[in-house]
Image (cartoon, grey):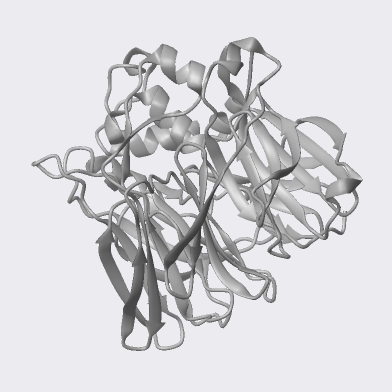
């Protein structure tokens, strides 16, 4: 494990006492300025008990540089030549050029709370991760030198608070690049355990699975784990291929692979029944954007292939068993979903495009109602004419409120009324449709 000390820009801010609660929040975003919506990472850490907030900003090039040599080596092994000359001409996954590909791989995707004011920022599919220590106000870059040759990390890590282990994913980038020509090309993949303060990894599962492994979750009993692929590959008839979901049973040393969802990027375990899990079916694809559009938006264009869906499964020693499905005609969802308890009722909260939150009964998978997010008109007229998109959502630990980050604001919304309790203008910041993390660790 190689540790690099970063020199971030830091800015403290204060949260109002009106939203005081026993909760902390980490929001990974990309920061822009003026007309340019890209350039720096910006991580927002908020402690709603103490009212303290900290913005940690890091240059995007500082994220790219340490892994560039490994990217070039892996690409060359897969028959790709990385150079400035093919920055816009070569084609990679989803039809992206090299600039789009590197932006995607290095964007901050998720946050993993470790406790004691520490948060890991996981990148989409790069060779390391960022550790933010809020107490010390430091940022450290951990490069995974213990990974096998040409392996790249997946987009998420799961922390076992009892053992102190991090569960992570990696896949062979050389073979991933082979899927550009052949979507059926096999990609070696592994799930492993590790610690940031120690060398070496322990393999949990390995085999040929897929690339762009996007989410990893383990249940409360530590018997079952699930891993989800981002997908978005097409066959010769231009139809989307189902993403792969790996389910593994640590107790009985068995595994199953599901291929029933289009872009099955995320999963969430039930808060009451530890063997029940919910999978997403995003049903959209990324599209190549021209240079001007890409840098002005700071995000990728998407095309929907129909409404999204959420699948409910029970994990058993004999394999996963489907319990129910939720979908409806106007359920076009980009990313986030969470299952939580609201006043004793199990609910699913899911993000809808462009500004809608769906509330679903997790017991019977029936629609409850929608919350339309009310975004403020930005003080900058250049942005006030553009639509605002939801980027990430998460329920508060007590199940009463919903944290919402849009392309122009951060909000706390009352779940019962749907009304905003707090709005912070963020028109120069962009979420890149990634994931905030809520924690009860307020010891900072």
The residue sitting at 53% across, 73% down in the picture is 270
Kindly tell me whether residue 156 is visible in this rendering. yes
Say whether residue 297 is left or right of residue 50. Answer: left
Q: Position of residue 424 (x, y in %)?
A: 75, 33
Q: Is residue 120 above or below residue 420?
A: below
Q: Position of residue 219 (x, y in %)?
A: 53, 75
**Camera-nearest residue between 188 and 436:** 436
Say whether residue 82 is left or right of residue 297. Answer: left
**Camera-nearest residue between 221 and 58:** 221
The residue sitting at 19% across, 43% down in the picture is 234
Q: Is residue 212 above or below residue 106?
A: below
**Camera-nearest residue between 46 and 6:** 46
The residue sitting at 43% across, 44% down in the picture is 334
Q: Position of residue 305 (x, y in %)?
A: 26, 42
Q: Position of residue 191 (x, y in %)?
A: 44, 65
Say whether residue 326 is left or right of residue 141. Answer: left
Say whether residue 81 is left or right of residue 418. Answer: left
Q: Is residue 429 above or below residue 354?
A: above
Q: Is residue 368 above or below residue 18?
A: below
Kindly tell me whether residue 201 is visible in this rendering. no
The residue sitting at 27% across, 29% down in the picture is 95
**Camera-nearest residue between 217 and 384:** 384
Q: Residue furthest left?
A: 237
């Amino acid at each position: 494990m190689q540790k690099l000390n970063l020199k971030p820009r830091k800015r403290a801010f204060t949260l109002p006492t009106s939203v005081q609660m026993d909760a902390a929040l980490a929001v990974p975003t990309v920061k822009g300025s003026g007309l340019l919506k890209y350039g720096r990472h910006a991580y927002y850490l908020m402690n709603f008990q103490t009212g303290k907030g900290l913005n940690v900003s890091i240059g995007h090039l500082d994220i790219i540089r340490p892994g560039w040599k490994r990217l070039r080596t892996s690409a060359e092994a897969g028959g790709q030549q990385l150079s400035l000359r093919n920055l816009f001409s070569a084609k990679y996954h989803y039809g992206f050029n090299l600039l789009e590909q590197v932006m995607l791989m290095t964007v901050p995707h998720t946050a993993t709370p470790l406790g004691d004011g520490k948060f890991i920022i996981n990148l989409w599919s790069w060779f390391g991760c960022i550790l933010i220590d809020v107490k010390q106000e430091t940022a450290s870059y951990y490069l995974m030198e213990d990974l096998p040759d040409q392996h790249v990390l997946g987009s998420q890590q799961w922390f076992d608070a009892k053992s102190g282990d991090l569960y992570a994913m990696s896949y062979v980038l050389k073979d991933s690049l082979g899927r550009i020509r052949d979507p059926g090309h096999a990609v070696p993949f592994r799930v492993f355990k590790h610690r940031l303060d120690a060398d070496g990894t322990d393999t949990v599962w390995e085999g040929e699975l897929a690339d762009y492994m996007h989410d990893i979750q383990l249940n409360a009993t530590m018997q079952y784990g699930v891993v989800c692929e981002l997908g978005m590959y097409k066959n010769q008839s231009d139809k989307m291929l189902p993403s792969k979901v790996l389910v593994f049973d640590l107790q009985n040393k068995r595994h199953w692979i599901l291929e029933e969802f289009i872009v099955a990027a995320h999963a969430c375990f039930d808060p009451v029944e530890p063997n029940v899990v919910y999978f997403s079916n995003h049903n959209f694809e990324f599209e190549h954007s021209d240079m001007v559009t890409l840098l002005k938006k700071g995000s990728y264009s998407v095309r929907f292939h129909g409404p999204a869906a959420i699948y409910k499964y029970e994990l058993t020693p004999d394999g996963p068993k489907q319990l129910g499905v939720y979908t409806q005609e106007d359920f076009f969802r980009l990313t986030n979903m969470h299952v939580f308890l609201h006043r004793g009722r199990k609910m699913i909260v899911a993000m809808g495009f462009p500004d809608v939150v769906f509330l679903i009964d997790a017991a019977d998978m029936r629609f409850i109602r929608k919350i339309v997010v009310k975004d403020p008109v930005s003080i900058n007229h250049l942005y006030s004419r553009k639509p605002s998109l939801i980027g990430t959502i998460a329920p508060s630990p007590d199940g009463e409120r919903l944290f919402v980050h849009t392309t122009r604001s951060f909000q706390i919304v009352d779940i019962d009324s749907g009304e905003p309790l707090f709005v912070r203008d963020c028109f120069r910041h962009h979420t890149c449709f990634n994931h905030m993390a809520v924690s009860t660790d307020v010891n900072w």
